[in-house]
Amino acid sequence: MNRHPPAPRIAPWILPVWVLGLALALGILLTRGQVEADLARFMPDVAAESGLDLPAGAGPAGRLLLLGISGGDDATRARASDALAERLQDLPAVAAVHNGRPRLDEASLDTLLNYRYLLSPAMEPGRFSGTALAEHLAARRDDLAASVPALPRHLVPRDPTAESLALLDQLAAPRDAPRRDAHGVWVSGDGEQALLSLLSRAEGLDLDVQEALLADIRAGFQDIAPDLVLEISGPALVAVQARSTIRNEVMLFSTLASLALAALLWWLFRSLRPVWLAALPLGAGLLAGAALVTLVFGQIHGITLAFGITVLGVALDYPLHLFAHARRPASPPSGAADSLWPALALGAISTALVYALMALTSFTGMAQLGLFVLTGILVAALTTRFILPGLLGRTGLPEARLPAPAWLLDPPRAGRWLLGALVLGALVVLASTQPFPWEDDLAALNPVSEEQRRLDRHLRGELKLADVRHVLVLRADSAEQALARTEALTPALEDLRASGGVAGFDTAARILPSRATQEARRQSLPDADTLAPELRAAARDQGFREGAFQPFLDDLETARSQPPLTPQTLPPALAEALTPLLMPQGETWLSLISLSGVRDPATLDGWVAQQDLSTLTHVDFKALSEALVTGFRDEALTRLGWGVLAVAVVLLVFTRSPGRSLRILAAVGAGLVLATAALVLLQVRLTLFHLVGLLLIIGLCLDYAVFFSRPLASVEDRRHNLGSVTACALSTALVFGLLALSALPVLRALGLTVLLGVIFSFLAAALLAQDMAQDMTQGSPHSSPSQTSP
Amino acid sequence: MRRPELWALLLCLCLPSIGQAGQGSDGSEAPGLSAVLGSMARDTPGRLAFTETRDDPMLEERQQLTGHLEFHPPDTLIRTVDRPRGETVRIQGNRLTVERGGQVRRELSLDEQPALAGFAAAFRGLMGNDPATLQAHYEIELHGDPSDWQLRLTPRDRTLARFLLGMEIHGGGGQLCEILTREAGGHESHMRLEPVEGP
């Protein structure tokens, strides 16, 4: 190892450049650094990917919160429900809150009554003809005596044609109501929980506002009913929770990993010096990675930062190798760095290569991770090579207590056979698992607990809220045009429902007819002079008193001069129902048609095509999201393939030994296959982030295999080599073992995958690479590739 | 508001015989209410003939209806109108059905309709000797004693109060005698009740 010429001294300009670079990175972070904890900014946004430019997170239900009150008896819960609803209604952040009491406030009800002749779907020509009128009056006559009148008696003088009923029917149409108990509030099916739904004014992804609102709700409830339990669910809550989980996890795991690594280093060397020395390349790597990501993406995501732990774990190998080999005065640190450098550079470059491929993906989160790790690893490796030796001084470090299992020095031949058998078994497992357990649901990456998810499903079900999966989007130049187009489409939608293509649909036109329709209805209203004689005759026939229907004639006269209602003049209760269905989008307006019970998306697409409307689009949020996931996965798999190929090339170039390259690759392959099969056997559904973990395993296993395969002649050297690799594997296993405990599925996926990968890679590298390297060294002890020094 | 809710409201207005309920907003029971309800408590079917007179400002003439009310413990109430035209309203458990000419015209679930459910709970409160339920739905004013009493009920629910101004119920000696119902718009109903022996 010491045969090549003394290493060139480290150029004097390197240290200043290094310091300057770090200062620059620090400056970038201090001035522009922004840690993003909103999961939505890490995940691809399905709504944005729809190509419709919908508002982010605009799954139309983004602003909805679901509340459940349990504990106490039903009367207590009902009182709490009423008190909470009343209190929340007054909050400026709340657009509407419902607990099962009549949905229309009196003002809205009055407006509806006043505008019934413009709004009622039953308003058609001939509505007030002689025969029709006679039938209506007969029905009203019944109402006056009936036990269960069709029209409330107090409305009979104003509304003999029961227009208000037709209107209310229309407004109530599309939704199943949740169950109400004897107290008149919504309750769960078993009656044990009072239910409320709340629509916030702010967008669901305006997390600061949502977080404040949630705190207000909880505080208010605490005042009202400290003895009862309030459960909340909904997209905004999930997002807020995810954000706080991410923040906490990032803090927690960064700290834990740092402490654990420091403890490990101290234990290995019984000295604090290696701890802060090792912190240098790691810190420099983190700093540089974070700065570059901030520079490129404008912010750095909390998950990316948490992933920095990865860098900690992997890049710690570099100083560890150096420390282990620089222990003796005989091998001064700079010399050790020189002799280690080829293997170290090979590992670092191969790993960086794999992450460079990842950095190029279109999945923001993955791209950030890739860039972060790639930068961190390269900077850490360079720091180890050029900065650390100078700091180690001439004396090096005390003897490390490297845990090196002796049998691995000369692994039994049977070990390889066993490994071969294991790999074969793993391949059988992988091949026989059909279908392969991919996780296609983006939501699975969400750090929300299964418990919270169950609560969400439960409340959603009890409140009879449909899953918003299929939406038709109709684009128009104005709100009026959007409403008119939606009205024009309604007959075709009715046909679609009649043919079973959908179970139901809901449109903005149900709530507000277009101005044109309202004007047409107004035109069709008869004037008092025409109507009065017929009305008088019909009323007399039914025994009504003279003038009993004067309020009706007055209302008609008012209606004949009413201006049509618009989205702006709609009473609050209706405006609130209209908002999610009709929204401005830049210069245009979108009318959303929500669909339920879509039997076959393809049929629906066919129907959309038949309409021959270039402004009409079908959005299937679930399919969209799954396509996204599948797309990214295919991308990641392709990259995995390219990564292996690129690594093979790099190996060949650096080692100039096809045999050694092949052995290293065999170890890497064995590590990958075993780790994947173990995941499958553990019943894990594989997500994108497991793939990221597999990418990382390539890098780790490469590192081990490269070091194990170093052609070392002396047993002493080999023992130290084994020791340093073992220490590396130990540190990585420690960090990722910690990560596997995280509450964040993303981090957990990584942790578990890499933990398994470290174990299998280490064994595979030890058994395959080293054993054969030994054979090789016997033949040509000095065919070391160590002359390569980039 | 949904249409069934309107029906519910109507029902409260139109089945005065059932609307009993009520009680102090502060949760305290009107004095003597338990005694009055206790005096009427029964665990066997009861049957009352009624004559209802409706005064309606919209109509030329006063209307008169006759029929009978039946209560089957624990929770079934049937109101049958014989004249001027046959109609049966039956509330059983959470179901309300309206029959005319032997045909079911309407079928509603009380669960979906707060006012109707409130009304049903109230009727069960009265017939089933449950003052707490009554008081949950109505302000109650009680005069007299179990031998001769008068109960004034005012709905607590504001929406219901828009339609139903109030009810007065007279009774004594374990029987309901009279129910006076005042609705918004001047609609008034006056029901006289008499026990009927046998089915």
Image: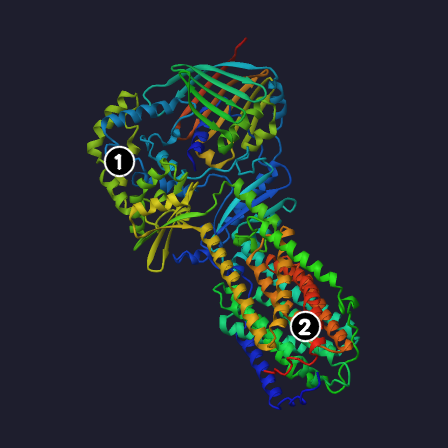
Kind of residue at disc 2: Ser
List the residue tagged with mark 2. A709
Q: Determine contact: label 1, label 2, CB under 8 Å.
A: no
Point out residue A510 in the picture as x, y percentages from the top left corner.
36, 42
Residue under numbered circle 1: A124
Mark 1 or mark 2, which has the lower sequence index? 1
Dot 2: element: loop
The residue closer to the viewer here, A133 or A374, is A374
Q: In the picture, residue A746 is in which quadrant?
A: bottom right
Q: Is residue A519 above or below residue A396?
A: above
Q: Quadrant of residue B36?
A: top right
Image quarter in which the C terminus of chain A is found: bottom right
Q: Is residue B6 left or right of residue A130?
A: right
Q: Amino acid at mark 1?
A: Glu
Identify the subunit bearing mark 1.
Answer: A
How dense is the environment of label 2, judged by Cα within 10 Å: few (below 14), some, or many (20 and up)?
A: many
Q: Chain of mark 2?
A: A
